[in-house]
Image (tube, grey):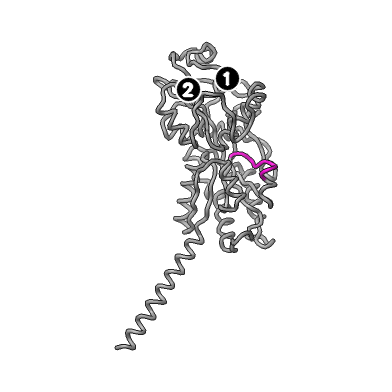
Amino acid sequence: MLKACSVLIIAFVILCSAFAGDRVLAADQELLGAGATFPQPLYSKMFDAYNNQYKVKVNYQGIGSGGGINQLIKKTVDFGGTDAFMTENELKEAGAQVLHIPTCLGAVVVTYNLPGNPKLNFTPDLIADIFMSKITKWGDPRIAAVNPNVKLPDLPIIVVNRADGSGTTYIFSEYLTKVSAEWKEKIGTGKSLKWPAGQIGQKGNPGVAGYVKQTPGAVGYVELLYALQNKMAFGNVKNKSGKIIEPTIKAVSAAANIRIPDDTNVSLTDTDAADGYPISSFTWLIFYKEQNYGNRNAERAEALAKMLLWMVTDGQKYVEPLQYAPLSKEAAAKSVKLIRSVTYNGKPILK
């Protein structure tokens, strides 16, 4: 009897050890990412689908592109998300080669809260002057001139911007720097900007969208999906070719109809494409080319590489349903090539 009990106890201990081992493996397979809120709804869907299929958890925190870059440099995450290609200083600070792969394209839209939420048209100079607080009333004759069939209210314009380091801000300000000499001189391009006094700062695309939605007369800039999810009005924009363009998947894809360099560092704002939406951009995931750093093991590095490869291939089927534009064949091929160049101890991880 005693011998039988001993056998059962030993078997129980072995079984518990096996379960403990599974927990350690599962924890090791939880990849960590942080950064851009621009693609966060898509990433949430992709990572949930990936976990269901491959049992690898991915924990992504939307803290803004600036935060994602900082966390990657500090090596506290496996990968970062950014809507702005890293600067030369940021790449130097990283201390080793960082790769960028685009995952999709999106549109930054001008969203607003007006009675009846009419569809408005905006010209580049109007957008610049509204966000420089030079146009302060919705009934301004310049807004009325490009919206002759809209009855505009006599409401003050309340400008809402991003208070955090934001790739969405980078895209929006890069566009305005290209189309407005005054914006270029006074504000410029960046993930964080010195905004005119009196404007309202909010964190993340959700923060801007939420504030605009609850504030009559407010105007802000967000990724298209946030406006759609919140059933908010957003404007059409006159592009370089003189066409008024609605931000659609087709118009965003058209903006990317250009040659993609091998490192994928390309700007799509103020596109030359006749039918392209002018405030479009890729969004990127960033990660170290050499994965043997810190206490990382080869299994974790391989899990990251496989997940990244899936995102730019099979995972692309989740892009359009969430109102982002999928990668072109050229952009996807460039991304695959970069992912296959990732190494561990100098040897390619993926065969």
The answer to whether any part of residue 286 appears in the image is yes
- The residue pinned by badge 2 equals 158
Using a 10 Å C-alpha cutoff, classify the residue at mark 1 as few (fewer than 14 neighbours), some (14 to 19) or many (20 or more). some
Tell me what residue is drawn at x 42 percent, y 28 percent: 213
Q: Position of residue 116 (x, y in %)?
A: 39, 20
User: Callout 2: helix, strand or loop?
Assistant: strand
Query: Dividing the picture into quarters, in which one does residue 284 lie?
Result: top right
Using a 10 Å C-alpha cutoff, classify the residue at mark 2 as few (fewer than 14 neighbours), some (14 to 19) or many (20 or more). many
As drawn, 304 above or below 207: below
| 78 and 253: which is toward the camera | 78
The amino acid type found where label 1 is placed reads Asp
Q: Position of residue 30 (x, y in %)?
A: 50, 57
- The residue pinned by badge 1 equals 129
Q: Residue furthest left?
A: 1
As drawn, 310 above or below 326: below
Q: Residue furthest top?
A: 141
In the image, the segment drawn in magenta is: 83-90
C-alpha distance separating marks 2 and 1 = 13 Å
Q: Position of residue 165 (x, y in %)?
A: 56, 38
User: Is 85 one of the magenta-colored residues?
Assistant: yes
Magenta-highlighted stretch: main secondary structure?
Answer: loop
Tell me what residue is drawn at x 63 percent, y 51 percent: 336
Between circles 2 and 1, the one closer to the viewer is 2
Residue 269: image tag: none
